[in-house]
Amino acid sequence: MGEPEPSRLVEEILALGEVFRGEVAPLKDEQELRAAQARFLGKKGSLSELMKRMGSLPPAERPRVGEAANRVKQLIEEEVARKLLRISALRRKRDLERLVDVTLPGRTTPNGHLHILTQVRRELCAIFAELGFEVATGPQVETDFHNFEALAMPADHPARDMQDTFYVGDGAGTLLRTHTSPVQIRTMLTRKPPLAIIAPGVVYRRDDDPTHSPMFTQLEGLCVDKGIRMSDLKGVLLHFVQRFFGPGLGLRFRASYFPFVEPGAEVDMRCSFCHGARSDCRLCKGSGWLEIGGAGMVDPRVFEQVGIDATAVSGFAFGMGLERMAMLRHGIHDIKLAYEGDLRFARQF
Ligand code: DAH
């Protein structure tokens, strides 16, 4: 082979323009067009390949080849610009022609809502607020004194066994509170009667089954004033039951023992599902009653611990489980559902 012929090289270069136009004619997409452009003008593209041959031409011939290369480059770039215009016009036309179904439902961002336990807590606070109760709070990490001792449960009291808990630090004086009753103590240590408070809050116990969780929520109530009687307690709880579970539901007190009240009672309400009419009722198991909490008249020993004169005032107290209130009201069978965060559960309330 002899020297490359300058005019052949120029022809080949100029021919690239036509080849390019032919190749991109059917393309309808910017990306493909850019890829074709790179195949022709890129560093390893067809034009560069041809230009490599320029090196073996006599210097006098090179300018012609260079000129041809510039021309074809310009040609290809113009073709790309033209094609791009056509592609975007086509796209706009297609957009305009697309059928839009204006009756389709819009895309919504789902709104969250309050958890069932938050809803129940707020509702209970509102119901007791109607009767003049204030909301009080206390720490979840408590002292033995507030949680047990001042509530008439000294160190070796057997009632402590029912509230086995989690001890913090060296295990002696500090623990996760087992009930909200210590808020009674904290309130009476800092304020004097007349008092009417409720204390919602998280409590902890060594318990774990479908109706008991090691962490759960209670609502405590305390009312202290001159001449407070058990009938006041009953009236307040009756108001609560009828507001929260439905009008007409009755209450009964069963004598029971809690060290910090005397007399003490377990409180049942009429079964909100069968009203005591069905021996096969699944909610009340045919008993006609549902237990809702403990209550009683504040024991004089408790008043003594907090420096209140038990001959001058009297008081009642009650405590109930918030989860139990939610479960009874909505027929929830497993307390764990309230903590799992499963949206299929959360969305039902
Ligand atoms: N603190 C008790 C418990 O968790 C519940 C209770 C019973 C609270 C009687 C009271 C009460 O205020 O008077 O088992």
Image: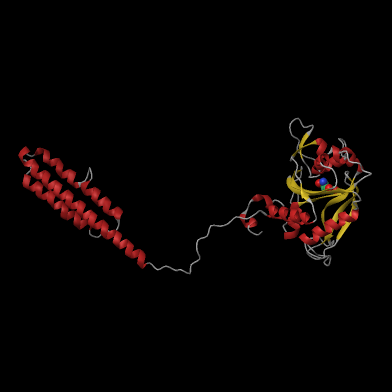
**Where in the figure is residue 205, as x and y percent of width and height?**
76, 43
- Visible in this render: residue 175? yes
**Where in the figure is residue 128, as x and y percent of width and height?**
78, 54
Q: Is residue 151 above or below residue 123?
A: above
**Where in the figure is residue 323, as x and y percent of width and height?**
74, 52
Toward the viewer: 310 or 123?
A: 310
Toward the viewer: 338 or 177?
A: 177
Q: Is residue 82 left or right of residue 240?
A: left
For the image, the number of numbered tags is 0
Q: Which residue occupies 84% across, 56% down?
A: 236
Q: Which residue occupies 23% across, 48% down?
A: 39
Looking at the image, which residue sits at the far right? 311
- Visible in this render: residue 334? no
**Where in the figure is residue 102, as x and y percent of width and height?**
46, 68
Query: Quadrant of residue 268 in the image?
Result: bottom right
Q: Which residue occupies 23% across, 54% down?
A: 80
Query: Quadrant of residue 231 in the image?
Result: bottom right
Q: Is residue 130 above or below residue 65?
A: below
Q: Is residue 101 above or below residue 342?
A: below
The quadrant in which the N terminus is found is top left
Query: Quadrant of residue 161 in the image?
Result: top right
The quadrant in which the C terminus is found is bottom right
